[in-house]
Amino acid sequence: MIYPWLESAWQAVLAQRDRSHHALLVHGPAGIGKSDFAAELASAWLCESPAADGSACGRCAACGWIAHDSHPDLRVLSPAVEEAAEGAEGAPRTGRASAASTDIRIDQVRALERFVGVGGHRGGCKVVRIDPADALNVAAANALLKTLEEPGAGTRFLLVTHRPDALPATIRSRCLAVPLPLPAPAAAIDWLVAQTGAERAQAAQWLAAAGGAPLRARAFADPATASTHRLVVETLSSLPETPVVRAADALAGIEPSLWVGTLQSWIADLQRCRVGAEPRFFPERAARLRTLSQQTSLPALDRLACGIATLARAVDHPLNPRLMLEDALLRVRAAWAG
Ligand SMILES: [Zn+2]
């Protein structure tokens, strides 16, 4: 589905249907609907009876196969597919296997060579969608480069990422960038209210905590997600006074990817308050953020942000989640120790 804030980008890309570059790099902030956008675009390209504006009809044979993940001229590369396939085969989920599943691997890219080399089954184009493209590991990215340089006739690529800088420049330079925007806050709040039935003030708070990304904000409407988020924010807000062990007990059992993202937003707000700006993610806690920011220094906050960014890189496969949590909390306390 195409979200309202992506409608003008959608119409622009559809207008290019037959003249477009063979490889598009769809990028923009996380949580705005890029994956849905790319999936819709693949459908539009493969649809055998598209609507007047070029979007997919949803009724032809091609649209039917896409709905059942069985279109012979569509390949989707993503780590999740790989992980699901491993699970289906009953492979043991060791730490190593789940670490590997965050990557798109070279064997997945090599499997494309044959797909790209033969003609389309339906006489139209073939589409390769890679999502998220930043999951390509180095070997896979190098293998893909060859295919991107000499694509088979009628093959189109859709790469999706919220971290275009994480892609090799050689890949980026072979793609046409399609930047997708965050919506204006008022429009995003309208949408959240319509989707969730929440009060506007509540929707505004969710949207801020999600950095303005409406799909991330909508996740807060789920009571379990909302209460986990509240616990993380309250615990962070109680630092540095709360002892590390007690804070770690409070957050034990929460997925590292959840608390790390919130901690990074919290530190970003502290940095903003330290230089006299308004908090972006937690405006409802502005008073506490200002007080805390005055009790430390900007270099200490910068060091903390760098330290947590380093931890965040291991967030999908931490060796020991509890140690990672305590490490992060010790770093937070250290920022107020000096
Ligand atoms: Zn169709």
Image (cartoon, rainbow, N blue to C red):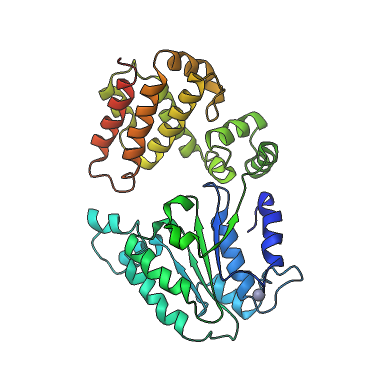
Q: Quadrant of residue 295?
A: top left
Q: In this view of the protein, which residue sits in the foreground, 290 or 208? A: 290
One can see residue 49 in this view: yes
Q: Position of residue 226 (x, y in %)?
A: 49, 35
One can see residue 94 in this view: no
Q: Quadrant of residue 146?
A: bottom left
Up-down: is 30 above or below 50? above
Up-down: is 164 above or below 126? above
In percent of the image, x 62 and y 73: which residue is there? 45
Q: In this view of the protein, which residue sits in the foreground, 81 or 88? A: 81
Q: Position of residue 217 (x, y in %)?
A: 56, 40
Q: Position of residue 241 (x, y in %)?
A: 34, 15
The residue lying furthest to the right in this view is 52
Q: In this view of the protein, which residue sits in the foreground, 150 or 274? A: 150
Which quadrant is the N terminus positioned in?
bottom right
Which quadrant is the C terminus positioned in?
top left
Horizontal relation, residue 196 to residue 90: left or right: right
Q: Please tell me how many numbered marks the rendered image carries.
A: 0
In percent of the image, x 59 and y 86: which residue is there? 123
Horizontal relation, residue 91 to residue 164: left or right: left
Q: In this view of the protein, which residue sits in the foreground, 318 or 92? A: 318
Q: Quadrant of residue 234?
A: top left
Horizontal relation, residue 262 to residue 34: left or right: left
In percent of the image, x 62 and y 32: which residue is there? 204
Q: Position of residue 309 (x, y in %)?
A: 36, 38
Which image quadrant shows ligand 1? bottom right
